Amino acid sequence: MSTHAPQAAQAVTLPTTLDEAVAALTAMPAAVPVAGGTDLMAAVNSGQLRPAALVGLGRISEIRGWQYLDGQAMLGAGLTHARMGRPDFAALIPALAASARAAGPPHIRNAGTLGGNIASAAPTGDALPVLAALEATLIVAGPGGARREVPVSHLLAGMDLLRPGELIGFVSVPLLHAPQVFLKATGRTGPGRAVASVALVLDPARRGVRCAVGAIAPMPLRPLDAEQWVAQLIDWDNNRAIVPEALNAFGEYVAAACIPDAAPGEDGTVPPLPPAVLHLRRTVAALARRALGRALS
Ligand SMILES: Cc1cc2nc3c(=O)[nH]c(=O)nc-3n(C[C@H](O)[C@H](O)[C@H](O)COP(=O)(O)OP(=O)(O)OC[C@H]3O[C@@H](n4cnc5c(N)ncnc54)[C@H](O)[C@@H]3O)c2cc1C
């Protein structure tokens, strides 16, 4: 571990193992971990954040790759979007690779990491709906070499937050060996933050479809009823065939589940949704329909 002070008031610690990083954070409770710095340094530069000290995670080689364990891929939190976008990773977890390729311009993808995307927990985090659809689990490193598992959905829902000194070490993702799709709508051409996104994965062993909608709420939304409904319409033994009308109906089902109608007024009539909300609902419906169509094609 090396420590230097670029400014008199601010220490930067550069540990080389996960446990050293946790120890540094535990020793300096005011210190903040930094991985690629794409979110954190933006907050520092805009004056929103003034960390007393930084613990850099960039030299921890154990979290920069992945390994296989019991049918799962154990992804290091330090994997960059650029690395996850490469073909060898795409062959393993296609939806996560697609979300990584969509995560901002190249300089952001080169520096930004999986762990940073999760810890920032921005509604527009592109990895988040994919991890929700995959029902991924975080391996969190804590003081004294402790490790605990936290479902990513629990962290994003605020049910189980990182405790002082803890770091996301790894993300455990099931290897489903089946088509997966991530689609994102932005408000502009070229790289941009999602207005809405949809991740859809097929789980042939369980004859299941899992879908998560990102960017339209503080955390990814899972339309569970729509997933179950469409899964029983798929002919799993016959090339995963489905009647074309079911694709449209699935899109509408997902969109209505995630963006419901307004509550009825006192006279019992349902007021129309505002045009912008209606547009968003149509966007979600189109993304979900296309995602299912591509996964089954
Ligand atoms: C111009 C621009 C465009 C962007 N476009 C997109 C986009 O299209 N899609 C998208 O998803 N994101 C986008 N982002 C956001 C950002 O690039 C991602 O969220 C990125 O994955 C963050 O990773 P990082 O390594 O840079 O995190 P950092 O900035 O280093 O850290 C972010 C937060 O996570 C914490 N942290 C980091 N690693 C860990 C860890 N292992 N354990 C615990 N806490 C940790 C830090 O303390 C900090 O609070 C964009 C950012 C910018 C500046």
Image (spheres, grey):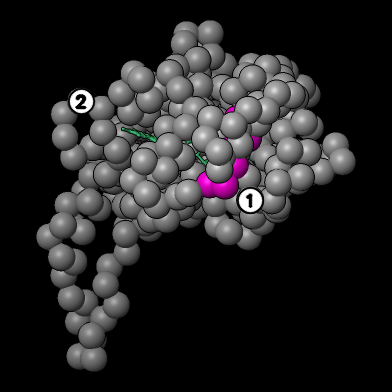
In x, y percent, where is residue 81?
Answer: 46, 22
In x, y percent, where is residue 123?
Answer: 40, 48
Q: In this image, 32 relative to 50: left or right?
A: right
Q: Amino acid at mark 2?
A: Gly
Check the picture and name the quadrant holding the C terminus.
top left
Residue at the spot 16% in from the left edge and 70% down from the top edge: 272
Q: In this image, 8 relative to 261: left or right?
A: right
Give the SS element for disc 2.
Answer: loop
Main secondary-structure element of the magenta-colored stretch: strand
Residue at the spot 59% in from the left edge and 31% down from the top edge: 5
Between the residue at mark 2 and the residue at mark 1, the CA separation in whole angstroms equals 38 Å
The residue sitting at the front extreme is 8
Give the SS element for disc 1.
Answer: loop
Residue 243 in the magenta stretch? The answer is no
Mark sitting earlier along the chain (2/1): 1
On the image, numbered disc 2 is attached to which residue? 190
Q: Is residue 240 above or below residue 224?
A: above
On the image, numbered disc 1 is attached to which residue? 30
Question: Can residue 114 be seen here?
Answer: no
- Span shown in magenta: 51-56
Q: Is residue 196 above or below residue 69?
A: below
